Image (tube, helix red, strand yellow):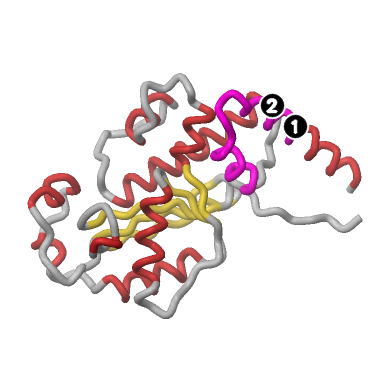
Amino acid sequence: MKKINMPKANTVVVLDFETTGLSPDYGDRAIEIGAVKIEEGEITSRFQELMNPGRRIDSFIEDYTGITNDMLKDARPCDEVMSEFADFIGDHNLVAHNASFDKRFLDSELRRTSKKYTGKFTCSMLLSRRLYQDAANHKLSTLVSYANIPSDGNFHRALYDSEMTAKLWLAMLEHINSHYGLSSIPFTLTQKLTKTPKHSVSKLLNREVKIISASLQKE
């Protein structure tokens, strides 16, 4: 029987945007991209760059992100940076904390370039709601503390947040492995988990263990 190679959840690009506002549908633009590439459970490379959105950002965004207009005035325009970032992504699948937000900006900014991506998205926040149901909330900073991940607390910069999300992602994969004995986790399973009712998570994972074990026995 021919072995089917399914993309693994421990080989992904984890990304985070800082932006001028909440939605590209209302004209908001990216001002920073940060990302880490995980291959077979190890962080192998990083990408970070500020982007000039073509206009000044307001004081709230400056205070929230620590990114100032002075920092952005000499930054390269979004389309140049995003074209390079598309090359960094390659054909990897993608992870973000509150992925719907980052996907909207990734899609919006790449539409302004000639580049595309082929990977699929999943959301670390939605996965954490299924796996860490006892956490006080599912903000990135709260989950980093909940999972005992070392942190200096300097959130809201893109590379730092993507680094912390990557470490959280790997911690959640290890949680699945330690609780269910599933060491090789398909990326599609993490997508499925984010859409599974909380009370059905254990049932789904136990079923997946049986399916994967049966598949390995047939090889």
Residue 203 is marked as 2
Residue 21 in picture, x, y percent from top left:
22, 54
Mark 1 belongs to which amino acid? Arg
Residue 179 in sight: yes
The prevailing secondary structure element of the residues shown in magenta is helix
Answer left or right for 42 relative to 47: right
Are discs 1 and 2 less than 8 Å apart at CB? yes
Residue at 89 percent across and 40 percent down: it is: 217
Q: Is residue 81 left or right of residue 96?
A: left
Residue 50 in view, yes or no: no
In percent of width and height, residue 200 lies at 63, 27
Q: Residue at x 24, y 66 (%)?
A: 51
In the structure shown, which secondary structural element does the residue marked by tag 1 occupy? Answer: helix
Q: Indicate whether 123 appears above or below 183.
A: below
Residues in magenta, as a range: 187-208
Residue denoted by label 1? 207
Residue 174, quarter of picture: top right
Count up the numbered dots. 2
